[in-house]
Image (cartoon, rainbow, N blue to C red):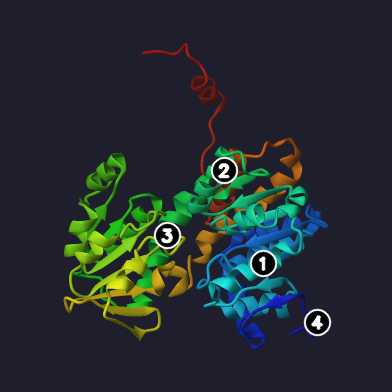
Amino acid sequence: MTTKTRAHDVNDLGLAQLGGRRIVWAAREMPVLSRIRGRLAKEKPFRGLRIGACLHVTAETANLMLALRDGGADVALCASNPLSTQDDVAASLVADERIATFARKGEDRDTYYSHINAVLATEPEITMDDGADLVTELHTKRRELLPKVRGGTEETTTGVNRLRAMAGEGILAYPIIAVNDALTKHLFDNRYGTGQSAVDGIIRATNLLIAGKTAAVAGYGWVGRGIAARLRGMGAITLVTEIDPLRALEAAMDGFEVTTIAEAAARSDLLVTATGNVNVIGREALANLRDGAILANAGHFNDEIDLAWLASQATGCRELRPFVNEYRLPSGRTAVVLADGRLVNLAAAEGHPPAVMDMSFANQALAVEHLIREGKALEKAVYAVPRELDEGIARLKLEAMGMRIDAMTDEQKAYASSWKAGT
């Protein structure tokens, strides 16, 4: 451990050795980011660049921070959720890598925002966000820093929605790349990453046997698809609730029973939200819960379950296990809430497997590089990851997996671009 550290606020620097081993282990499953890190270390495209990141402080995120640092950037990192920090990883980033890190697992709301402001105090030129809290704080309370910001990236569906709303109102002050919308992000991270890690968090918190249980998934976006598929694969009788008729129809065609949230609440042993919206499990559903139902959230913010109403109705609440709180209702029934309604995969487990975050964070690194090259020509809007970067990441991932694909011949290219060929 080094004796000189950057500015920081972490729980215990003594955990650094354990965190360092975890970072190295994650790197084994992140070959695409490792290749990009090697190139960035040689070329130093970020030399002198200040990057402020508000992301889940995990071993996978640590490898992204190291890639940016090796590319020449001065990086400051805070958590994007009060319960998602891995304290040993935060300690290693500070003590071993000298990266300014402000994150404590279980931090309260005031500490959470003080950490965001500690990152903003470094006057970042690039922002990296997961949920848009950093960007929102910057635009509402630290506007004097906006002229120095050249661009940003956003990792989540929830954050992208917030940023597009800002852009639509003419508030967004600099261009932001929606990393979440990259195909190599949401088709894989959201579906396979959250699909596995959310169920992992539920099992770690509860030791629940999934087989034979009735489970409901609220929302059939890419996250909901992944969770529903894995719950069914583990033997659960799986229901889906939706407000979008096309997604609901797709869920039905995929073999799931589609129903309302009120009916699902009355029938389910386990309900998992994955919508990014507020009070999805609201008063009607909560009043309709079957006794002992377990509620978990896989969305970014802890507002998908109406916890305020549940707490107001409960006659008591007790912690049965870490991240497992049982509310007793006047009827005598109980409702069990996991991880205070926060992201169950990161609060009660370790988040996505590194093999999935490999592609998401490769997108982050390349998006920053794109902003440095093209940022001055971009308007103050939300942009997709350029298709060539997305495809390049997919090719690198396939190569790392030992797989090959074909290429069109000149004849096939001509045929595909012509209108003359017919029956």
Q: Secondary structure at mark 4?
A: loop
The image quadrant that residue 295 belongs to is bottom left
Q: The residue under label 3 is which amino acid type? A: Gly
The structure residue drawn at horizontal position 56% and vertical position 59%, both measured from the top left corner, is 358
Label 3 vs label 1: CA separation? 22 Å
Q: Position of residue 381 (x, y in %)?
A: 62, 39
Please tell me the numbered disc located at residue 4: 4
| Type of amino acid under label 2 | Glu
Q: How many dots with numbers?
A: 4
Asked whether residue 344 appears in the rendered view, the answer is yes
Which is more foreground, mark 2 or mark 4? 4
Q: Which comes before the other along the chain, label 2 or label 4?
A: 4
Q: Amino acid at mark 1?
A: Leu
Residue 172 locus on image (x, y percent):
63, 44
- The residue at which mark 1 appears reads as 77
Q: Which residue is mark 2?
A: 391
